[in-house]
Image: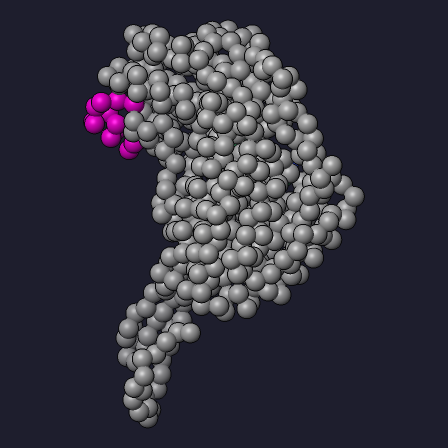
Amino acid sequence: MQELTHYINGAHVKGTSGRFADVYNPATGEIQAKVPLANGAELDQAVAHAAAAQPAWAAVNPQRRARVLMKFVDLLNRDMDKLAEALSREHGKTLPDAQGDVIRGLEVVEYCIGAPQLLKGEFTDSAGPGIDMYSMRQALGVTAGITPFNFPAMIPMWMFAPAIACGNAFILKPSERDPSVPLMLAELLEEAGLPKGILQVVNGDKEAVDAILHHEVIQSVGFVGSTPIAEYIYATGCANGKRVQCFGGAKNHMIIMPDADMDQAADALMGAGYGAAGERCMAISVAVPVGEDTADRLMEKLIPRVEALKVGPYTAGNDVDYGPVVTAAAKANIERLVQTGIDQGANLVVDGRDFNLQGYEDGFFVGAHLFDNVTKDMDIYKYEIFGPVLSTVRAETYEEALGLAMDHEYGNGTAIFTRDGDTARDFANRVNVGMVGINVPIPVPLAYHTFGGWKKSVFGDLNQHGPDAFKFYTRTKTVTSRWPSGTKEGGEFSIPVME
Ligand code: NAD
């Protein structure tokens, strides 16, 4: 049995707490490795190395820090297949989807290569007589992030790339379900020239998270995961004086207007509802056709598509639409919620309960489910299922459909499918959700915009990546300076260089 490690001060370090978690291959159900769960003393060691290394890293000019990230991008591309394979083996998603996970992280690394531009401060010449005023953005020091299982490459990169580009040290506590890719990323960054101690990986569970939240040296905590844990981390981190941003769960609605291209809408729902087995915070989990006729036409298109979905292991290559869910517990939770949907009166029009894959009977596969006639009071509508289950709520009017998205406690993403610009514009303006798609089912903003939901999908002020990340990982210092007039120096004739 493979024993995974932490990555502390540039080396793989065995766990010393004596506690481990099992890491599964979700396709076969086999335990393929065990990951150490850190205690407070192990975190202390990482923090001490980070604190020792960070001042020198912050003093490296931003252009040189960016060059490390440039090299890192090259290495990510070099090792893309290896990273994707390791990711699929622990997570279960298909290989193309695993590559997408790495690429969406890589794009944020590319954005962070702009650090010299993004970290430029502000300057007011002659704010008063002989007075200049300028603001600089300075690194926080030692920062930390806690990441979920569903994007084990992308979300760590969304956090550590801007943190490092700004001159911080970063301690990553990845999900204990799929910790191998984060360890590989730390190795690659060191190969790219990152000094030891600037990116460390401390594996663990609540014990390691609590140690992070209570550590005096750690200045900021980023979190992505489920809403109850996000709320806990936000409250505890803030109470301990840290800068905290937490991104939580979701229940994303897609509204289908009567004038929508129904084939386009049905195709969009397939990828957005069932891709990655529904284990995406931007997955569409609720379809809201407006009008009975729209709903009937949508169902006619959707049902055969859902029935034709190909479910299988990542090793089957491009012949698979989605893979298993991450653990047996996740599978049991999905099955439990599907049963509540049936018990509470929803109409299960595609029933994936008997799904069985020959040769993979112990894998955590879940067949595709499609519910019709779902109502607001049902558990399958209220709670995040995080599985291949799409619920259809039939709305009579556009206002009722908009109200559904508005009234739900989550506000991560939403989409509208229509040919009418006025309706689309009204929807984008009024809906209280952070990311909106117009004929785009998964509107994940690109690296140079910011990513974040509203309502119970977020806790904190600043979004992930884009310009917000450079604000989150720096503090502003503003200097007012007056220089008394004195002797002027003579000229300097060689071009100044910053090396
Ligand atoms: P999770 O909340 O179970 O775990 C996330 C992290 O928190 C992990 O590192 C885990 O070790 C840690 N953790 C778990 N229990 C803890 C506890 N009691 N105390 C302290 N730390 C704890 O989430 P998950 O199952 O890994 O990920 C799926 C969830 O993440 C879904 O709800 C999904 O919507 C959400 N998500 C949100 C976004 C977003 O940007 N809003 C992105 C991806 C995933």
Q: Quadrant of the N terminus?
A: top right
Res. 116 visible in picture: yes
Foreground: 295 or 397?
295
Q: Is residue 157 above or below residue 270?
A: below
Q: Which residue lies at the image location 64% right of the left edge and 38% below the top edge?
A: 176
Compare residues 256 and 311 and report the one nearer the observer. Answer: 311
Residue 188 at x, y = what percent? 54, 52
The residue shown at (38%, 45%) is 447
Q: How many marks?
A: 0
What are the residue bounds of the magenta stretch?
A: 417-430
The color scheme shown is one colour
Residue 424 is inside the magenta segment: yes
Describe residue 421's horizontal placement relative to residue 97 as left or right: left
Drawn side of residue 470 relative to residue 259, left or right: right
Give the prevailing secondary structure in the magenta stretch: helix
Residue 237 seen anywhere in this rendered image of the structure: no
Q: Quadrant of residue 169?
A: bottom right
Nearest to the observer: residue 23 or residue 221? 23
* Residue 332 point in image, percent of width and height: 63, 19
